[in-house]
Amino acid sequence: MKQVKKILLVDDDRNLRNLLSSYLLSEGFFVHSVGDVRDALVLIKQDCPDLVISDIMFRDLNGYDFIKLLKLDAIFIHIPVIFLTAKGMTSDRIKGYNLGCYAYLTKPFNPKELLAIIHNIFRNIDLLKTKSLYNSNKVVASSEILDSFTPTEKNILNLVLDGYMNKEIAISLNTSLRNVEKYISRLLNKTSTRNRTELVRSIINFF
């Protein structure tokens, strides 16, 4: 079952909060909304959201202060922030992006555009998580393969990586060419590769 994403909306315009909360709820999100940054910080500590949509202009702490505080905390640094604000100058947007916001929308805005941005952010996060898990599993699998090599196989593999041909490996290890070919075949089988080129490439990719 897919987990419902939690969104925190921070804006001092109550009407906007109500309208946008209703819209996002209708799109399948769980929404909390507050009127200032201090309340947002309290709520985040109680129930960490998956994404924050925040205005910038507040009487006390502003949106820039808000994102700075989130990025200072290792627990909350991962939370993506969308700025939704009337501050539409290029310098304002650049400041927002430099502070780490994922997107910057100026008011008035199209709710469908905001929704598309939200979906895109979550999609990218899911892709990164999948890639991270894949790479983690790949590292484990690679480690298991390398650990399965015998000392002789490792010696021969190192010579293959150094560019030695089978005859040169046989001379270097004072063994028969047939014996070297047998070990090369084992290495190919263990790494699921078809030839020396693929073997070298697969070992390099392990690292």
Image (cartoon, grey):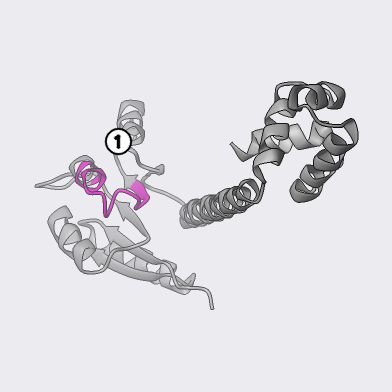
Residue under circle 1? 99
The answer to which of 13 and 168 lies nearer the viewer is 168
Left or right: where 108 falls relative to 189: left
Q: Is residue 7 magenta?
A: no
Which residue is situated farthest in the bottom direction here? Answer: 1
Picture coordinates of residue 6, whole percent (x, y): 37, 67
Picture coordinates of residue 80, whole percent (x, y): 37, 50
The answer to which of 124 and 165 lies nearer the viewer is 165
Q: Around disc 1, counting alpha carbons within 10 Å, would you say few (fewer than 14), some (14 to 19), or many (20 or more)?
A: some
Which residue is situated farthest in the left direction here? Answer: 60
Evaluate whether residue 195 shows in this view: no
Relative to 68, does residue 43 appear above or below in the rendering? below
What element does badge 1 sit on? helix
The residue shown at (68%, 37%) is: 203
Q: Amino acid at mark 1?
A: Leu
Quarter of the image where one finds residue 97:
top left
Which residue is situated farthest in the right direction here? Answer: 178
Q: Which residues are magenta?
A: 67-83
The residue shown at (56%, 53%) is: 140
Quarter of the picture holding the C terminus: top right
The answer to which of 207 and 100 lies nearer the viewer is 207
Relative to 11, does residue 205 appear above or below in the rendering? above
Which residue is situated farthest in the front direction here? Answer: 174
The residue shown at (82%, 33%) is: 196
Evaluate whether residue 41 shows in this view: yes
Quarter of the picture holding the N terminus: bottom right
